[in-house]
């Protein structure tokens, strides 16, 4: 007999019901912990992850030329779309983040990488900042949870789904639509806007 494989379902919750994203308060704690980090390069890395929603590997590929100082945005190469040459998305970020990156990194050499860590080392460093922030361990307390937290935060902030899709580099709107699945405090907040 042949086994019938289950289709892969993208969800903000594990099969056991564990949340895979940072809540608003957890995201705020993470940003505060990153801001107080004494290592400037780690501080800038964590803030780029938090304010762009990029994948950890996409952040590690950033070079000086990707920081759009006049546009206050960061140009990210969508690594999930490797077969398509030159897929780049521009994500608007706070001016304070651009200022932080300019202070920490030498942007005068366009091809210079901003961070030279391996993916696993960067993952460990982000997890350490989450622990310093007091975020309880779990599926949500990861760089991927930070990315999902960005998506949830964007939806909670009223950003149109098509912009969230573009900023996160999703090929399909179906993938982006998972951020509409929020429950708990996030869902109540969305529902309260409807009830007003």
Image: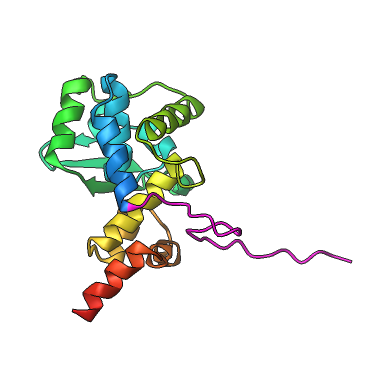
| Residue lying furthest left | 70
Evaluate whether residue 74 shows in this view.
yes
The stretch in magenta equals 1-23
Foreground residue among 128 and 157: 128
Q: Quadrant of residue 160?
A: bottom left
Vertical order, 162 against 37 (above or below):
below
**In the image, 2: left or right of 175?**
right
Q: Hey, which residue is sitting farthest right in the picture?
A: 1
Secondary structure predominantly adopted by residues drawn in magenta: loop
Image point (13%, 43%), residue name: 71
Q: Which x, y percent locates residue 111?
A: 29, 24
Give residue 149's position: percent from left, percent from top.
Answer: 36, 51
Left or right: 68 in relation to 131:
left
The answer to which of 184 and 31 lies nearer the viewer is 184
Query: Residue at 29% of width from left, 32% of height from top?
Result: 33
- Assign the C terminus to one quadrant of the image: bottom left
Residue 163 makes an appearance in the image: no
Quarter holding residue 48: top left
Determine whether, in the image, residue 18 is placed left or right of residue 86.
Answer: right
Q: Residue at x 28, y 31 (%)?
A: 34
Where is 94 relative to 186, above or below? above
Quadrant hosting residue 151: bottom left
Residue 195 placement (x, y as % from top left): 23, 80
């Amino acid at each position: 007999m042949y086994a019938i494989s289950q289709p892969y379902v993208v969800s903000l919750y594990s099969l056991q019901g564990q949340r895979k994203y940072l809540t608003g308060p957890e995201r705020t704690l993470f940003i505060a912990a990153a801001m107080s980090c004494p290592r400037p390069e780690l501080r800038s890395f964590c803030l780029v992850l938090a304010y762009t929603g990029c994948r950890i590997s996409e952040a590690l590929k950033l070079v000086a030329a990707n920081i759009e100082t006049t546009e206050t945005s960061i140009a990210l190469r969508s690594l999930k779309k490797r077969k398509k040459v030159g897929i780049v998305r521009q994500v608007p970020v706070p001016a304070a983040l651009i200022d932080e990156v300019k202070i920490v990194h030498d942007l005068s050499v366009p091809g210079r990488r901003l961070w030279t860590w391996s993916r696993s080392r960067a993952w460990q460093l982000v997890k350490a900042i989450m622990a310093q922030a007091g975020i309880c361990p779990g599926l949500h307390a990861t760089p991927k949870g930070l990315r999902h937290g960005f998506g949830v935060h964007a939806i909670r902030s009223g950003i149109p789904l098509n912009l969230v899709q573009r900023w996160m580099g999703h090929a399909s709107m179906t993938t982006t639509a998972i951020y509409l699945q929020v429950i708990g405090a996030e869902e109540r907040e969305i529902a309260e806007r409807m009830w007003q």
